[in-house]
Image: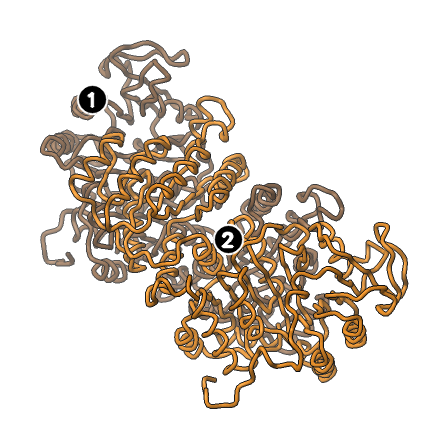
Chain colours: A orange, B brown
């Protein structure tokens, strides 16, 4: 797989024409081929039209279906050829055997690219399926880049393109690009990203990856100024050499985070039936990704959490941290987790302990590091003083604050008030933001919720509100301390062996 | 630590009297010493009175405070001696230096035990603190067992005793006992257990563990017919030999799950300031727990999830499973995780695949195992047929069903209905329960939620409702597939090396 002496195909030059990614990701005019005027049909084409409309796509949309008709007052063209304008991008959702003809027609209409949502190609494992894929490849080589088939398409918040079934994704752009063959993985990641505060430059589900796939997309994203972090879920790759070269080049310029699925025997078997790609052994992948300088993660939560950390934290490693929380077991647990991930929690000097201790209720508190503030109800101004003081320790490169806000349920009950009124979550987020600005050292927030049941939905909602306050201030938030520390450790793995200036100058 | 030739003290015979645990856990008459009639004082005593009242404790409660007065129409005695009846159990929340006198008075009033919520003892690290603890030990030895000091107390759903600050814990009993020095850990565990569907026999936060602690409690719980699973968070122990003997004896009769905190250097430092116990090295603890036949887990989520699995699954190992879900990446991921944890996902025979495939939408589905049902909207009756068919494979010992219910948000929006009306979560839980009953093979449910944001609270609520439907039918539910498989793997570790009949006959 890593025989670098083998002839390489340059991902950027695979076709005899220059790919116009600008028109693919930010199209002005799109065609949706395979919409039905019968809204109850629930087809992908009509669903995509509704989704893109809901996203507020500002360009022109041309709908195509041989039966004609109208949807929401918009005329449906019977043939792609009938579209009166040149198009930039096409979304194709017709039955598999009709896809090649539709793709060719879109190419003739000037489309720089098309996403093919339809399935029924090589992933079936049939001769017919493979031949259809080959036809697509041939048409693509004539001048239209193809995303798919058997995919959920492109989500680009800036342009308003969205993937299946996503009418409810964010229009706010951000630094993270996400690539996956699997549509399910891509849409789930995009949804999770929304509440986690991860903003995207673009998300691409490329399904069978008949034409455009990880290599070409890495090549493009490496130099995409809107992308600062590249996250990927990979089931299999087609061309090991090119992949290695492209991921290494990309990881040299910006963090590339990879979740490789199908590393088990059964997983590899499952990959074959999912997106008709080749899997690969666990050891080979570990080695390849390490050599390439990419960061390997091990499940989708870790992938999302690392993506958030890379997007929101300064571009460097954090070897030594302070932890502030209310409840001693948190301090003990924090030390255990930090040690597991190779992150130091240095005890503060006696002087610093004394100064921090002056802010804390006694008994029950500890100013050692972790700082145990003794109870979950310590007010934000006090927590702010503690964080400001802890940041004075030169060893502290990052701070974590753990707030057990769910305990306010008891107080809300005592005073018979809605919990959102008694929890000072906005003041907390403001205090933390101010600490970051004044100290220049990042703070990561942890908001566990031990009360997630049906009887406590107002607590779950309050914690979602608290999370949003942090997100609005670009403070990374995690559910659990373990998640936060693992994400920081992942940032450390990427930046640990590098010149910290690499990325800015890249 | 494991020098078994050293003289051992028998936890059950440490005192010259027989401990009446029945009167401690199920008291008929309790005294709360240190309540203030001034409700705004927020003291632990008054808080505990409110909490126990909210729990609906059916016995008699006697309140004590030198100032006298009334709370909610209940007279406050000025002195413990004034209580007109013998008491079974006392809750003491007066300032530390007054605790010994109060404890002695409670002993004289016939209490079998007392929990001391007050802090200010040996955890301070001062001579005075240590001496106060010694005084408590001396009084305890005369005939009253002490839980604490510096603890959150006892929660026993059957009797209505609750721990700080828990007015909102469940009154429904179950098979799990939980022990922790840390009050914060105990109350958080109890809260998390509630929405997870873990039911308790008793929970004890014993703080400094001056008298009653892990060894005595293990000794008692080993033979407690109401306890089938023992979970513990340990920071430190006092007597290694007795601990080893008691945990080994308990683990020989029922699963004992241990989270050991303070295994890191910094963690051990933090333990000292938290509950004044000794920590211990990582390797020693691993070895001790393994030799004792107890199961070691590594964080509190894993602890809770394993507790749930032991409580709800049949008492045996599950080496080979089937997985049913909608969305191919789930299948791939599932195989990877299962392999990591040493659990098989055997491919089905062609015949079985054909029969399962007949129920599934095509294309996009796979009946291989994992079974990919192609989309998240497959109806419960079909899923039921798939599960029934998959259970016919003799290799399958347990099934996992992953339902991406959050995707129904799109359908709810399309039909403009509340999501709880369009998601067939009750039918799903009923179908799964029926499959378990008909096949005799357990099914574990996984309900991920990628849409947890403020804008999707109705989805979060719907998933909590779906979880409750499963819990009401004794089906274990996890948020993520990884959590489910790890919990099953933990069950396998415990039962893997044992005669499966051990526990029933124990």
Q: Is residue A480 left or right of residue B78?
A: right
* Residue A348 coordinates in the image, percent (x, y): 20, 45
- As drawn, the label of residue B102 is 1
| Dots 2, 1 in contact, CB < 8 A | no
* Chain ID, mark 2: B
Dot 2 falls on a residue whose secondary structure is strand
Q: Is residue A101 left or right of residue A478?
A: right
* Residue A397 coordinates in the image, percent (x, y): 30, 51
Q: Residues within 10 Å of mark 1 (few under 14, many from 20)?
A: many
* Chain ID, mark 1: B
Q: Nearer the viewer, residue A350 or B39?
A: A350
Residue at the spot of label 2: B478
Dot 1 falls on a residue whose secondary structure is helix
Q: Nearer the viewer, residue A379 or B271?
A: A379
Q: Is residue A112 above or below residue B258?
A: below
Picture quadrant where residue B272 is located: top left
Q: Residues within 10 Å of mark 2 (few under 14, many from 20)?
A: many
Q: Is residue A154 above or below residue A409?
A: below
Quadrant in which the C terminus of chain A is drawn: bottom left
* Residue A402 coordinates in the image, percent (x, y): 37, 42
Name the residue located 63 percent from the left edge and 55 percent from the top edge: A158
């Amino acid at each position: 797989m890593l025989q670098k002496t083998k002839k390489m195909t340059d991902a950027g030059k695979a076709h005899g024409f220059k790919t116009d990614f600008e028109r693919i990701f930010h199209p002005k005019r799109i065609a949706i081929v395979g919409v039905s005027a019968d809204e109850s049909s629930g087809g992908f084409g009509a669903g995509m039209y509704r989704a893109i409309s809901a996203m507020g796509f500002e360009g022109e949309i041309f709908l195509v279906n041989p039966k004609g008709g109208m949807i929401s007052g918009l005329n449906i063209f019977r043939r792609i050829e009938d579209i009166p304008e040149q198009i930039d991008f096409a979304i194709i959702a017709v039955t598999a055997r009709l896809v090649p003809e539709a793709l060719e027609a879109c190419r003739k209409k000037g489309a720089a690219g098309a996403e093919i949502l339809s399935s029924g190609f090589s992933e079936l494992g049939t001769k017919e399926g493979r031949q259809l894929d080959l036809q697509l490849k041939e048409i693509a080589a004539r001048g239209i880049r193809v995303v798919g088939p058997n995919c959920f398409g492109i989500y680009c918040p800036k342009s308003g393109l969205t993937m299946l079934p996503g009418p409810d994704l964010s229009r706010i752009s951000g630094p993270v690009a996400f690539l996956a063959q699997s549509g399910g993985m891509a849409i789930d990641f995009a949804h999770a990203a929304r509440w986690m505060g991860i903003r995207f430059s673009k998300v691409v589900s490329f399904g069978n990856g008949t034409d455009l796939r990880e290599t070409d997309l890495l090549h493009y994203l490496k130099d995409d100024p809107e992308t600062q972090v590249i996250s990927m879920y990979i089931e299999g790759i087609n061309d090991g050499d090119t992949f290695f070269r492209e991921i290494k080049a990309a990881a040299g310029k910006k963090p590339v985070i990879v979740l490789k699925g199908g590393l088990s025997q059964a997983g590899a078997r499952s990959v074959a039936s999912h997106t008709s790609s080749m899997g690969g052994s666990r050891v080979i992948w570990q080695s390849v990704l390490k050599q390439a300088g990419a960061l390997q993660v091990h499940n989708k939560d870790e992938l999302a959490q690392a993506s958030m950390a890379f997007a929101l934290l300064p571009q460097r490693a954090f070897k030594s941290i302070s932890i502030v929380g209310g409840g001693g077991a948190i301090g003990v647990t924090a030390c255990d987790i930090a040690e597991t991930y190779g992150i130091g929690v240095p005890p503060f000097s006696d002087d610093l302990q004394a100064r921090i201790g002056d802010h804390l209720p006694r008994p029950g508190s500890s100013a050692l590091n972790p700082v145990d503030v003794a109870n979950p109800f310590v007010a934000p101004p006090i927590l702010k003083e503690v964080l400001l003081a802890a940041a004075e320790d030169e060893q502290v490169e990052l701070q974590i604050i753990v707030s057990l806000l769910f305990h306010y349920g008891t107080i809300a009950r005592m005073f018979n008030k809605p919990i959102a009124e008694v929890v000072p979550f906005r003041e907390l987020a403001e205090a933390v933001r101010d600490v970051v600005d004044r100290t220049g050292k990042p703070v990561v927030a942890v908001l566990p919720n031990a009360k997630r049941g049906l009887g406590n939905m107002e607590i779950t909602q309050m914690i979602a509100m608290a999370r949003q306050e942090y997100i609005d201030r670009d403070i990374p938030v995690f559910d659990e301390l373990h998640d936060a520390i693992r994400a920081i450790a992942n940032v450390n793995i990427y930046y640990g062996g590098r010149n910290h200036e690499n990325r800015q100058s890249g």
